[in-house]
Amino acid sequence: MTDDYIATVRLLLDIAPTVFRSGLFAMKGGTALNLFVQDMPRLSVDIDVVFVDHAPDREAALAAIGAELRNVQQALQDRGLVVRLPGNAQGDEVRLSVNGPNAQVKVEVNFVFRGTVLPVQSQPLALSAQDLFTTNVSLPVLAPAELYGSKLVAAMDRQHPRDIFDVMHMLQRFGWTAEVVDCFVAYLAGHNRPVHEVLFGPAKSLEPAFTNEFVGMTRDEVPLAMLAETQAQLRHELPRQLAPRHREFLLSLVRGAPDWPLMPFEQLQDLPAIRWKLQNLATLKKRNAARFGEQESLLAHGFDTL
């Protein structure tokens, strides 16, 4: 773990209680997994944030997110930190940048995937992190199964060494659990890329990002070959972990008529990301019926080859 990464995490832990004080937000992503669920196998330098209430419409949610981030900005500036909050959302996220004397932390709120499928938990900082940073905080964090379900989508899509590393530790500690696979399917359903591309797309090289964006983050040295082995295991095993009900749900989703009772989450059909996905599929069906139908046929073909 390099000094630069340690300084960044120190700043992250210093500002995190302010970010989450309102109750509007919960933490997800690598920071939640590595500093709160696992016992700090690696450092993570960004704060990924979920707006936990799925009920407000897009404009109301954006307004609430923006107002709370301005409150956070003011509180941190009052402490002497340099805080930048762009006026407009970037992509699917609203970002806040916080600069301390020798580190920068980004706070990223995803305004498309709002809400949760499992109850948010208050989670204390991992013991190793408490020892290293001589602090202890408890923060609102997504449930572990939901954290890993979301992480699996990222790992299958981006195939970044950090995501693969997190999956490796999940498999070592928990294996493939039914609840994690359920959450993976839920997050896959709300993902912005076609389902078949995430499940059955080509493998990506880990090497460039390994050197530039991974080395120095882990407590123990991790060779590239070990991550490549986990990447191959993930791509082979995860599609095969999908039960018949998962497969049928995903096929019904890409047909534009999800069979909701196949999934265990009552509020799934109300999540904004799912509604947005269905709206985009309906638009595609009107504009290009052949391409719309291809999504189902390619997904079905992928399942048939397993």
Image (cartoon, helix red, strand yellow):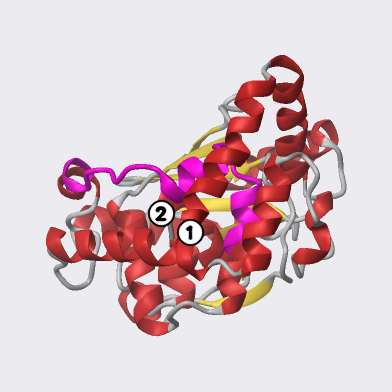
Few, some or many C-alpha atoms within 10 Å of disc 2 (few <14, some 14-19, many ≥20)? many
Relative to 111, residue 188 above or below:
below
Callout 2–callout 1 Cβ contact below 8 Å = yes
- The image quadrant of residue 290 is top right
Q: Position of residue 113 (x, y in %)?
A: 67, 46
Left or right of residue 262, residue 207 in this image: left
Few, some or many C-alpha atoms within 10 Å of disc 1 (few <14, some 14-19, many ≥20)? many
Residue positioned 68% across, 58% down in the render: 248
Q: Position of residue 300 (x, y in %)?
A: 56, 48
Residue positioned 19% across, 43% down in the render: 212
Q: Which residues are magenta?
A: 184-209
Q: Position of residue 129 (x, y in %)?
A: 37, 75
Q: Is residue 80 magenta?
A: no
Relative to 196, residue 249 above or below:
below
Left or right of residue 92, residue 4 in this image: left
> Closer to the camera, 124 or 74?
124
Residue located beneath label 1 in the image: 151
Mark 1 lies on a secondary structure that is helix
Residue positioned 78% across, 50% down in the render: 258
Residue located beneath label 2 in the image: 155
Q: Is residue 202 magenta?
A: yes
Q: Position of residue 143 (x, y in %)?
A: 62, 72
- The image quadrant of residue 73 is top right
Counting every numbered tag in the picture gives 2
**Measured Cα–Cα span from mark 2 to mark 1:** 6 Å
Relative to 132, residue 237 above or below:
above
Mark 2 lies on a secondary structure that is helix
Residue 127 visible: no
Question: What's the amino acid at mark 2?
Answer: Ala
Question: What's the amino acid at mark 1?
Answer: Lys
Left or right of residue 267, residue 81 in this image: left
